[in-house]
Image (cartoon, rainbow, N blue to C red):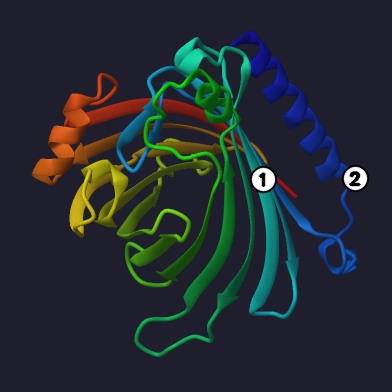
Amino acid sequence: MKKLFALMMVLTSVCLFAQEAAPAEDSRPAWLPTLELSLDRSSRYMSEGNVGNPDAIDTLSLTLGWDITDNLSFHIGGVGIYDETDACNNRHNIEEWNWLAGLTYTTPEFDAIGKIEIKLDYIYYNYPRNKADALTGKTLHNHTVDTKEYEIDITAVDLFLSPGIVFVHDFENDVIKANVNVTFEQKLEKISENLTFECPVELWFGNHQYSGTDNTTVYSLCVQPSLNYEITENVSVGTYVLMGWALDSDVRRDWKDDENNNAFNVCWGLNLTLSF
């Protein structure tokens, strides 16, 4: 935890220096990308409500973006998940690498619903620990070694609760899944103008390995209330609680058969986000 805190302080100092040294917006070179760097500490590794690693993990992500036109941008990024525990026989090692590239398009404003944001991403997932475990002959839980998928995210950004849908296709394992989502966001100005409460809610459905069947089902509900404090225009910190419920009876049974899961899973987290 001390190493994580020290890294957070170093990254924050770098970003504050970059903010002071950054050129004015109108003089920013067109080729210079926007950059977002985030560091997250989570008590467990949960995905779509399912616990993949029951112990604490650290996640570092970096995204670079370039504007192509006023409505279209291109981005690339990477995510590293670091295991600081003995979970999965992987102490002090990288548990997962994710690499992505994609486009974001924002439509012109429609009279009834405002603007629509459409994101298309190609994501490559790599699990170094699974390759090591495969050599021992151990059964791998919920993952195959290296997967590739594409993801389409459509959000009505101007509507109340910003409703959206995310479609995901893992074409190597023939997994098709999606979620419908809404996000409640409220500035807590009575406490601080820089403090924001945010709560996304996701309902997941599809044919998925968590259910142990190829049948399409509504399998989980995820809720993540969070508090985010904007230290400067470029630096923010936050804390959150992530909760996931197994909805389908087969999924609930599958989760309960796994010693890391219950019908209702919870984890907490802290994060630091730098952007410039």
The residue type indicated by label 2 comes to Ala
**154 horizontally vs 112: left or right:** right
Separation of residues labelled 2 and 1 (CA atoms): 26 Å
x, y percent for residue 211: 22, 44
Outermost bottom residue = 111
The N terminus lies in quadrant: top right
* Image label count: 2
The residue type indicated by label 1 comes to Gly
x, y percent for residue 162: 37, 65
**262 horizontally vs 113: left or right:** left
Q: Residue at x 77, y 24 (%)?
A: 10
x, y percent for residue 232: 67, 41
Q: Between 229 and 53, which is closer to the camera in this rendering? A: 53
x, y percent for residue 192: 48, 38
Write down the quadrant of residue 274 in the picture: top right
Asked whether the viewer can see residue 48, the reply is: yes
Q: Is residue 32 above or below residue 233?
A: below
Asked whether the viewer can see residue 156, the reply is: no
**255 horizontally vs 99: left or right:** left
Mark 2 or mark 1, which is nearer to you?
Answer: 1
Write down the quadrant of residue 196 in the picture: top left
Q: Residue at x 51, y 44 (%)?
A: 193
Q: Which mark is residue 78?
A: 1
Q: Which residue is labeled 2 in the image?
A: 21
Q: Is residue 92 above or below residue 57?
A: above
- Mark 1 lies on a secondary structure that is strand
Q: Between 155 and 18, which is closer to the camera in this rendering? A: 155
Write down the quadrant of residue 217 in the picture: bottom left
Q: Is residue 110 above or below residue 233?
A: below
Q: Earlier in the sequence, mark 2 or mark 1?
A: 2
Q: Residue at x 43, y 21 (%)?
A: 138
